[in-house]
Structure formats: C-alpha cells, structure tokens
Image: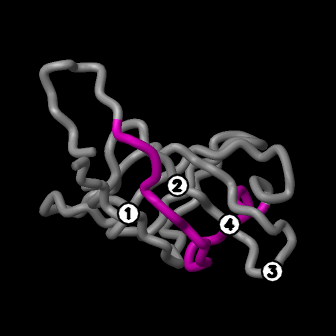
Amino acid sequence: MVQYTALMPADISARVIANTRLSSDYNVLALAAPEIAAAARPGQFVMVKAATSYDPLLRRPFSVFEVLRDETGSAIGISLLNKRIGVSTGLIYGAREGDTVACLGPLHRARCLDPTVALRE
C-alpha cells in the first residue's frame, strides 16, 4: 500500500511586508506567510489572488522566489517575483505594505539538482 505523506498546502491571507519595484513592470513582493515559508522547498509555487472581489476570479501561480527569515533563522515569509502583464499581476504590482493577498501553497513536488540530497515529498 502506498502512503501519501505530502503536507496539505496552507490557504492564508498573507500581509504584504514590502513591495520592491525593480522597473516599470517588475517587482518583488514580500509576504508574511510563515506557514508557507516553513514548508516551501525548491521548485514549489503558490497561488496568489490580490483582489478581494470576483474580478479577477482566479488565483495566479508564482514560484517561491525567496524564503524570508528572521535574525534567528526562522521562516517568516516568502517573496515573489512579478511581471505586470494583466489585471491580476497589475494588482500584485500595485500592492502596498499592510495590504493582504490570498495565498495558497506551497504546491507541487520539491526539486533538487543534487541527487545525493533527499527532499521531503
């Protein structure tokens, strides 16, 4: 019998810690999401929705760009690299510190290029 051991993703309202504009279309959004940050591994992503209404309706996938840590090394959040190309990514580009976004993750299997390292499924 195969036993399913993957952790369930967290569905949270993540507070925007910072929004760093890199250009007129690119930004890095830092989110307070300790539950997601603690479980995130390379190759995983989150589904994000910045709108509080039904427009746009669907969440958008974003790779976890970075796991944010405090001075003790505890995972406190994640950052996402965003390119403004539509309504959803435009809302994410315009997010302000203190705003909240719906965030579901981490999703997908973790990946590692080093075959000697075993990652938790």
Between 9 and 48, the one lying in front of the other is: 9
Residue name at image x 65 percent, y 46 percent: 82
Amino acid bearing label 2: Val
Label drawn at residue 53: 3
Residue 90 lies left or right of residue 21; in this view the side is: right
- Which residue is labeled 4 in the image? 49
Q: Are marks 4 and 3 in contact (CB under 8 Å)?
A: no
- Which residue is labeled 2 in the image? 46
Between 7 and 102, the one lying in front of the other is: 7
The tally of labels here is 4
Q: Residue furthest front?
A: 1
Q: CA distance from mark 4 to mark 3?
A: 10 Å
- Which residue is labeled 1 in the image? 36
Residue name at image x 52 percent, y 55 percent: 46
Residue bounds of the magenta highlight: 91-110
Residue 109 picture location, percent across and down: 39, 41
Q: CA distance from mark 2 to mark 1?
A: 9 Å
Q: CA distance from mark 3 to mark 1?
A: 23 Å
* Mark 3 neighbour class, 10 Å CA radius: few under 14, some 14 to 19, many 20 or more: few
* Mark 1 neighbour class, 10 Å CA radius: few under 14, some 14 to 19, many 20 or more: many
Residue 110 lies left or right of residue 72; in this view the side is: right
The image quarter containing residue 102 is bottom right
Specify the color scheme. one colour
Q: CA distance from mark 4 to mark 1?
A: 15 Å
